[in-house]
Amino acid sequence: MRKKIVAGNWKMNTLPAEGVELAKQVAAGKHTVCDCVSFIVCPPFTHLSEVSKTLEGTGIAVGAQNCAAEAKGAYTGEVAASMIAALGCKYVILGHSERRQYYGETSGTLNRKMEQAYANNLVPIYCVGENLDEREAGKHFDVVKAQIEEVVYNLTPEQFGKLVIAYEPVWAIGTGKTATAEQAQEIHAYIRKVLAAKFGAAAEECPILYGGSCKPSNAAEIFAKEDVDGGLIGGAALKAEDFLAIGKGF
Ligand code: PEP
């Protein structure tokens, strides 16, 4: 039975005190959601410490939204995976489409970030997904296949056993347009097939989350699909009520 995960990507939103308040609200409402759901929140770097402390003992995990490709040293403005781990974080989002698009992250960079994450016992939430042109040209399968082959295929079986994948069609992120449950299932099943080609039966254990305008009104339908193991939530993760309601989609 695969883990069911609802992860919140807060992006560059909330001031530290607001983030702590949001985390408190999520923790306070967690008992209303099935114990079978693992919640993760990914605040900005500046609040990782406070949010981690706030969530200690609640069963809600904390993740960062990115990490450096290097271990340490003269990399002004970067944050090392070791620093993130030292704050009590368990996860790190890598390869989000906004990082690929606005900060030029390539598979080469992402391979190095993945290594840093694993070297520091962080579980990567590795994002893949096509843009609108690629979807309309019917290239979405090839795009996600390449994103997986160029990065995930470089993992050892042991590392792969600790990976979470998020399928996030770029055309659905923050646009209000959601992939249909059928579209999500189709590509999640395909992703699992691509993973199985390299890692065999272990692909059955890898959680694959859907992301892209997931909200309380559509979560249950999407999560009901066989190969959808939860969601990576952007906008709707900024309201505890909505984030928790998405968790009730299971
Ligand atoms: C995201 O960017 O990870 C995301 C899924 O955003 P939204 O839910 O706002 O579309």
Image (cartoon, helix red, strand yellow):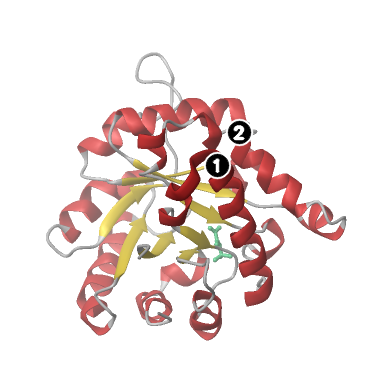
Q: Residue at x 67, y 44 (%)?
A: 145
- When the figure is inspected, residue 75 is found, relative to residue 24, above or below; the finding is above
Relative horizontal placement of residue 213, taking residue 200 as reference (left or right): right
Q: Position of residue 38 (x, y in %)?
A: 30, 65
Which image quadrant: the N terminus?
bottom left
Marks 1 & 2, CB-CB < 8 Å contact: yes
- When the figure is inspected, residue 217 is found, relative to residue 49, above or below; the finding is below
Q: Quadrant of ligand 1?
A: bottom right
Q: Position of residue 178 (x, y in %)?
A: 65, 72
Which residue bears the numbered disc 1?
95
The amino acid type of the residue labelled 2 equals Glu
Q: Residue at x 25, y 37 (%)?
A: 85
Q: CA distance from mark 1 to mark 2?
A: 7 Å
Q: Position of residue 25 (x, y in %)?
A: 26, 74
The amino acid type of the residue labelled 1 equals Gly
Among the two numbered marks 1 and 2 on one chain, the one whose residue lies closer to the N terminus: 1
Pick the residue in front: 230 or 159.
159
Which residue bears the numbered disc 2?
105
**Element assignment for label 2:** loop
Residue placed farthest to the front in the image? 201
Residue placed farthest to the left in the image? 57
Please say whether residue 180 is visible from this viewpoint. Answer: no
Q: Residue at x 26, y 67 (%)?
A: 21
Relative horizontal placement of residue 74, taking residue 86 as reference (left or right): right
Residue placed farthest to the top in the image? 74
Q: Residues within 10 Å of mark 2 (few under 14, many from 20)?
A: some
